[in-house]
Image (cartoon, rainbow, N blue to C red):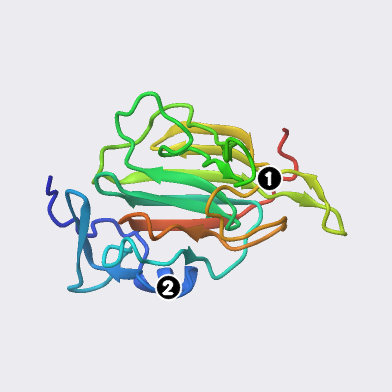
């Protein structure tokens, strides 16, 4: 289904300069004036100011997008769209993925659906995949429509010698104004993580090689969730 080009209509959308100040340059990612969802593809136009950020020109070869700054406790506000069957993910600290997938209407949902905490992976285990957490509800909008995700994340607490004191935790994840994760512990990096081991701060990554995605907002606010009860 072709939706037609989606033009900028709200002044709160990010500008090209804001994207450049948030993310490191990465092959396969570009800004765009407008995006057009046509079936399983995203087409772009560049006819003026660029407000969208997308991997549409290289959806199977784009690198993992990486923030310039490192973050620990934080709130992420993201607005994005994916076409039919597309797949991406937001990796907190480069390790813990909240899944982005065209999942509208699917029942039941699993860890690999929109808003799920993706599973961990160990080739020496049987089964190799473990520890994923499905979203509480299927809150995904249809493919081609804008999705809004708000993630509140508490980073791991480490001793001075680097030993783990407290696991990282997703305090909450809301998708399209519905609660999909609440107080979920991440006991280790999820599959395809870009970082290993423990850290108190690190870069946020966005998966770019599993399918096309376009963002109109990606805001990270540093927080202090030390007093949040378990």
* Cα gap from disc 1 to disc 2, whole angstroms: 27 Å
Q: Position of residue 4 (x, y in %)?
A: 12, 53
Q: Nearer the viewer, residue 146 or 100?
A: 100
The circle on residue 151 is: none
Task: Using residue 73 as the reference point, say whether residue 216 is left or right of it.
Answer: left
Residue 3: give x, y in percent of width and height: 14, 49
Q: Please give left or right for residue 224 compared with residue 105 in the image.
A: right
The correct choice, above or below, for 26 with respect to 36 in the image is: below
**Residue in the picture at 26% in, 72% down:** 49
Residue at x 62%, y 60% (from the top left corner): 195
Left or right side of 21 for 210: left
The disc label shown at residue 168, or none:
1
Q: Quadrant of the N terminus?
A: top left
Q: Are marks 1 and 2 in contact (CB under 8 Å)?
A: no
User: What's the residue at 53%, 48% (across, down)?
Assistant: 97
Which percent across, then down, holds residue 228? 71, 38
């Amino acid at each position: 289904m072709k939706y037609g080009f989606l033009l900028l209509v709200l002044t709160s959308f990010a500008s090209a300069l804001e994207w450049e100040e948030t993310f490191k340059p990465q092959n396969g990612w570009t800004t765009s004036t407008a995006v057009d969802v046509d079936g399983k593809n995203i087409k772009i136009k560049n006819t003026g100011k660029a407000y969208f950020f997308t991997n549409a020109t290289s959806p199977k070869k784009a690198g993992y997008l990486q923030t310039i700054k490192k973050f620990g406790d934080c709130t992420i506000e993201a607005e994005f769209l994916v076409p039919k069957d597309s797949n991406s993910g937001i990796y907190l600290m480069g390790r813990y993925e909240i899944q982005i997938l065209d999942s509208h209407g699917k029942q039941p949902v699993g860890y690999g659906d929109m808003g799920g905490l993706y599973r961990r992976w160990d080739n020496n285990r049987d089964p190799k995949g473990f520890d994923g957490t499905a979203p509480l509800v299927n809150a995904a909008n249809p493919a081609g429509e804008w999705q809004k995700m708000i993630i509140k994340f508490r980073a791991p607490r480490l001793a001075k010698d680097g030993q783990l004191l407290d696991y990282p935790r997703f305090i909450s994840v809301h998708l399209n104004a519905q609660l999909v994760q609440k107080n979920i512990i991440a006991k280790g990096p999820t599959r395809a993580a870009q970082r290993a081991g423990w850290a108190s701060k690190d870069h946020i990554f966005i998966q770019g090689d599993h399918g096309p995605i376009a963002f109109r907002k990606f805001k990270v606010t540093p927080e202090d969730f030390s007093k949040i009860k378990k």
